[in-house]
Every structure is written in structure tokens, then in C-alpha cells.
Image (cartoon, rainbow, N blue to C red):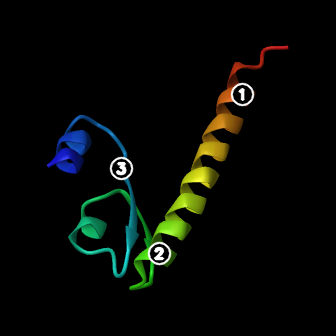
């Protein structure tokens, strides 16, 4: 419900998923699927993906706000 509500309010939703992505892969704007059935491997991959996303956001935030 949170994904559907977010999209109705104009948000782009990234799904960081495991296995085959389940039902959510068809609802989100960008499904990032770790194709594994091993929960620890999926969680490790998710952690790396989240760090990469944070790095991209931080770099873009700094670049856009650096007026010097």
C-alpha cells in the first residue's frame, strides 16, 4: 500500500528485491533484483546497493549545491 500511495503522490519508487522480485517488481518504477534464494547473500547485496545509491545521491547533492 505504501508503494501505491507513494506513486499516486508522484514519487518514483525503487524496489531493492531478492529472488525473482515477487509481486513488487511489477509495481515499482525501478526494480533492482538480486537473483538469489540465499537470504544472507541477498542482504549483503542490498547493503552494497544502498551504499552505492547513497553515494550517487550525495555526489549529486554536493555538485548541485556547490556554488563556488
> Foreground residue, 46 or 60?
46
For label 1, the SS is helix
Position of 64 relative to 38 (above/below): above
Q: Quadrant of residue 44?
A: bottom right
Q: Position of residue 36 (x, y in %)?
A: 44, 84
Q: Would residue 6 appear left or right of 52 to someone viewing this image?
A: left
Position of 33 relative to 15 (above/below): below
Q: Nearest to the eye among marks 2 and 3: give it.
A: 2
* CA neighbours of label 3 inside 10 A, class few (<14), some (14 to 19), many (20+): some
- The numbered dot on residue 62 is 1
* C-alpha gap between disc 1 and disc 3: 23 Å
Q: Position of residue 49 (x, y in %)?
A: 56, 60
Q: Position of residue 54 (x, y in %)?
A: 60, 44
Q: Quadrant of residue 12?
A: top left
Position of 2 relative to 10 (above/below): below
Q: Would residue 11 appear left or right of 35 to someone viewing this image?
A: left
For label 3, the SS is loop
Q: Which residue is mark 2?
A: 40
Q: Earlier in the sequence, mark 1 or mark 3?
A: 3
Q: Quadrant of residue 37?
A: bottom left
Q: Would residue 55 appear left or right of 35 to someone viewing this image?
A: right
- Residue sitting at x 54%, y 59%: 47
Amino acid at each position: 500500500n505504501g508503494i501505491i500511495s507513494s506513486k499516486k503522490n508522484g514519487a518514483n519508487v525503487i524496489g531493492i528485491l531478492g529472488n525473482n522480485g515477487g509481486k513488487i517488481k511489477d509495481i515499482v518504477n525501478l526494480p533492482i533484483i538480486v537473483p538469489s534464494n540465499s537470504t544472507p547473500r541477498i542482504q549483503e547485496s542490498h547493503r552494497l546497493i544502498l551504499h552505492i545509491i547513497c553515494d550517487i545521491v550525495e555526489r549529486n547533492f554536493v555538485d548541485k549545491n556547490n556554488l563556488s
